[in-house]
Image (tube, rainbow, N blue to C red):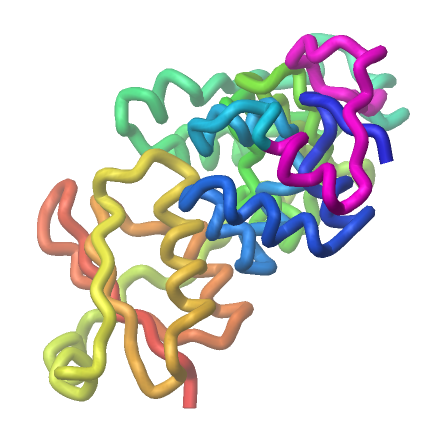
């Protein structure tokens, strides 16, 4: 297979699964790719060039590591940093006028450490039949996509470049039930009891310093290796609303202790 800086990591892994360990060996930052869920979220939208920046290595390091597996460098295609396969808009989105597309750019909110969920909820709730919402972000908002698709929305991700992702949410059926439903966040009545139950049998992580979407990815990565009899104690700066839906789907229970603004604790454990 011919590869260059624009080749997606997912294509490498599909061509030869052994590429996973070759990539992981390049940088500790790539260890999260061993987690199937994180791999699915990241590999499909990450090119060799983008991954090299994340792992603080050079694209040539990728080429050298993958050469023994039969990959060859395509020197005829320039590495311009643009997405190698930008897909056309679905017919329904193409049929909409600019006035029918509501745009919300959340990049500045995230850069300022603000949670964009509430503004997104407001925009979704205000959508009228025949309108679509375009969320502009610096990464693919996989948790939001998962949450809204469960509630009847269709989605389409248009990667403009490595720093800009435009994600469209829409309903072709014209349904006007646009309220985002999230999981219960008030369940700390037995916090002390649960804390005592897992005393001495709990792994602790602090994700307050991580930028989105890394807190959720770090939590899921830890849960992937957590023994069923243990609990995960998480220090977070906010209630991770999107994570809660994912936990429910993966049959985990959780307790939330909203201590104060910027300080939230969670205990996550497997359902018995």
Locate residue 212, reporting x and y percent.
39, 36
Quarter placement of the C terminus:
bottom left
Identity of the residue drawn at 26% across and 48% down: 207
Identity of the residue drawn at 55% across and 68% down: 249
Residue 17 or 237: which is nearer the viewer? 17
The part of the image, by quadrant, that contains residue 84 is: top right
The answer to whether residue 134 shows anywhere in this view is no
Locate residue 166, reporting x and y percent.
62, 22
Instruction: Give the answer, above or below, for where 191 lies relative to 11.
Output: below
Instruction: Give the answer, above or below, for where 205 lies relative to 130.
Output: below
Instruction: Give the answer, above or below, for where 188 lies relative to 77.
Output: below
Residue 200 or 148: which is nearer the viewer? 200
Q: Is residue 222 left or right of residue 139?
A: left
Locate residue 53, reporting x and y percent.
48, 24
Residue stretch in magenta: 62-88
The answer to whether residue 251 shows anywhere in this view is yes
Quarter placement of the N terminus:
top right
- The extreme right residue here reads 91
Magenta-colored stretch includes residue 66: yes
Magenta-colored stretch includes residue 218: no
Name the dominant secondary structure of the magenta segment.
Answer: loop
Q: Is residue 253 left or right of residue 45?
A: left
All told, the count of numbered labels is 0
Identity of the residue drawn at 43% across and 55% down: 243
Identity of the residue drawn at 68% across and 9% down: 80
């Amino acid at each position: 297979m011919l590869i260059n800086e624009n080749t997606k990591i997912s294509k490498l892994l599909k061509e030869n699964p052994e590429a996973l360990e070759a990539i992981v060996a390049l940088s500790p930052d790539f260890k999260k790719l061993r987690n199937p869920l994180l791999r699915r979220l990241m590999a499909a939208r990450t090119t060799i060039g983008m991954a090299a920046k994340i792992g603080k290595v050079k694209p040539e390091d990728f080429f050298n590591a993958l050469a023994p597996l039969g990959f060859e460098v395509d020197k005829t295609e320039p590495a311009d940093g643009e997405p190698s396969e930008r897909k056309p808009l679905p017919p329904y989105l193409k049929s909409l006028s600019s006035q029918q597309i509501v745009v919300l750019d959340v990049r500045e909110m995230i850069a300022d450490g603000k949670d964009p969920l509430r503004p997104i909820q407001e925009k979704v709730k205000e959508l009228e039949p025949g309108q679509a919402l375009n969320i502009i972000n610096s990464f693919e908002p996989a948790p939001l996509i998962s949450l809204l698709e469960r509630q009847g929305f269709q989605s389409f991700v248009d990667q403009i470049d490595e720093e800009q992702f435009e994600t469209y949410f829409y309903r072709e059926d014209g349904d006007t039930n646009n309220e985002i439903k999230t999981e219960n966040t008030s369940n700390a009545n037995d916090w002390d009891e649960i804390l005592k139950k897992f005393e001495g049998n709990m792994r602790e992580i602090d994700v307050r310093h991580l930028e989105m979407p890394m807190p959720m990815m770090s939590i899921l990565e830890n849960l992937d290796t957590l023994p069923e009899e243990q609990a995960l104690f998480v220090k977070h700066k906010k209630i991770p609303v999107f994570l809660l839906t994912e936990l429910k789907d993966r049959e985990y229970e959780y307790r939330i202790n909203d201590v104060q603004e910027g300080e939230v604790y969670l205990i996550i454990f497997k359902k018995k």
